[in-house]
Image (tube, helix red, strand yellow):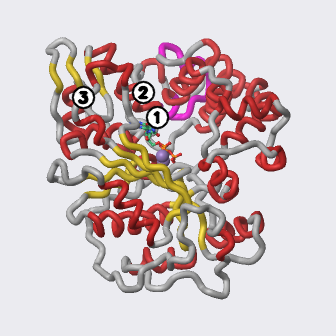
Amino acid sequence: EKPGLELAVVSVPSYACQRHTPLLHHNTTLTDALSILAENAELSENEGRGVAFRRAAALLKSLPQEVRGAEQLRGLPCLGEHSLRVIKEVLEDGVSHEVETTTHSEQFKAMKALTGIFGVGAKTADRWFREGIHTPSDLQRSGHTLNRAQRAGLQYYDELNLPVTKSEAVAIGQIVERAVHAVLPGAEIILIGGFRRGKQTGHDVDFLITHPDEGREEGLMPKVVSWLEAQGFLLYQKTTRNSYLESKEGPARPASNMDRFERCFSIFRLSTDNEGREIQTGREIQTGDDPQTYSPTLTNTDPHTHSDTHPHSKTDSHPLPQTLVFPKPQTSDFPRLPQTPDHAQKVSWVLGHSQCSGPRSWRAVRVDLVVSPYSQFAFALLGWTGSKLFERELRRWAVHEKAMTLSSHALYDRKRTQYLRASSEEEIFAHLGLEYIPPCDRNA
Ligand code: 8DG
Ligand code: MN
Ligand code: MN
């Protein structure tokens, strides 16, 4: 009998939304292996299989200690036959044959590379793969007609696949705040997604925007986007009204205020040489790109940008309001901290892979903006903080354990046939009969 933990006697609840799942945990080797298989299942459009691997990984992330032997897993929920087999293999041999085969498979590599293009999903990538297109370069050479998102995705491929750092997220937040307050003073801007959960890097930056006077937020997104475009901050944007329609979810869909939900998928042009200064001083950016290094050809390719407009207004110098909320840094004594890429190294990496010659002092960053009416704010906040599995588990819990329907707009009680109001995430957890789980523990 190995010393240490007796996990089987630790009672672990089966829904991820009942557990605390920190960002840094004790079973990274195992969860990395399961995540590869989950990703492969998702890329093969086998959602059920993907969810099974994700649930198994999430269970391991919530354990208080490292698993050293399969006997320690007895009695734990969420571990299916397939996941258990993979876990045992990794525990015994250090690697899983299936994971190794997957990571080296031409199909997996191609699907990852192609879905890594902004605007390309698994279906499209699979079609291209079967035509012999395996890389973004293959795609470029193929002469396929691409939509606007995919063209931008290809153009900024390398940069959009570089992790966005926390300091870049802060810098983007300051720009978004300026934009929003320029068109709607008093609006609130909250960092959501992975950064709200305490992640040090992300694939994008997500923001939720609302206004305490319900109704004032209506039509906000086009105005914010116009401001950002006029200032030269946008390389790409697609604003969607009425996009998050849970038409299949029936009563959880509030009929009237539904169509006020607006969102914008965008690519920001973030000035890299100003980033550090901006964060250190907390003041507005006073200078733009160095004219010696600025390469205007890079921004002229998309008709939706205004590259001749100077990206940073020198006249607008209101102090920054303090409504932007960032997660507290997490203290941790775990050995495997996520690696934040060195900024200088990152910039040179971008330059080395740039399609155009000549240095430049900005990078492309994916940004998601969501506008919510104040009465739905708590639901939107909970729904857009993630993780994706945590959200899925919350909804599953609501339906199967509480006969309720949860969405990013509302919570509906099927037994009492009424919507349950909430002005905070805590109230929603309470309605659901769940212990409150803070954002930093929603990393399922
Ligand atoms: P990352 O960017 O660091 O990779 O991680 P993330 O921030 O957790 O992932 P994300 O892809 O940016 O998604 C953030 C949250 O937004 C996630 O919890 C799921 C949620 N979300 C979408 N799309 C939609 C949607 O269409 N409706 C709703 N309600 N939520 C969505 O990504
Ligand atoms: Mn995100
Ligand atoms: Mn996002």
Q: Is 129 located above or below residue 152 in the figure?
A: above
Going by the image, does 91 lie left or right of 283? right
Judge whether residue 68 is colored magenta.
Answer: yes
* Element assignment for label 1: helix
Residue under label 3, please give it: 254
The residue nearer to you, when weighing 308 against 18, is 308
Q: Is mark 1 within 8 Å of ligand 1?
A: yes
Q: Earlier in the sequence, mark 3 or mark 2?
A: 3
Q: Residue 2 appears at what percent x and percent y?
A: 59, 25
Q: Residue 228 appears at what percent x and percent y?
A: 43, 66
Mark 1 neighbour density, 10 Å: few (under 14) some (14–19) many (20 or more): some
Question: What segment is highlighted magenta in the picture?
Answer: 60-76
- Residue drawn at x 68%, y 33% as measured from the top left: 124
What's the CA distance linking mark 1 and mark 2?
A: 6 Å
Which numbered disc covers residue 392? 2
Q: On the rendered image, what quadrant is the N terminus found in?
A: top right
Q: Residue 191 appears at what percent x and percent y?
A: 37, 54
- Residue drawn at x 31%, y 40% as measured from the top left: 380
Q: Is 98 located above or below residue 36 in the figure?
A: above
Q: Amino acid at mark 2?
A: Arg
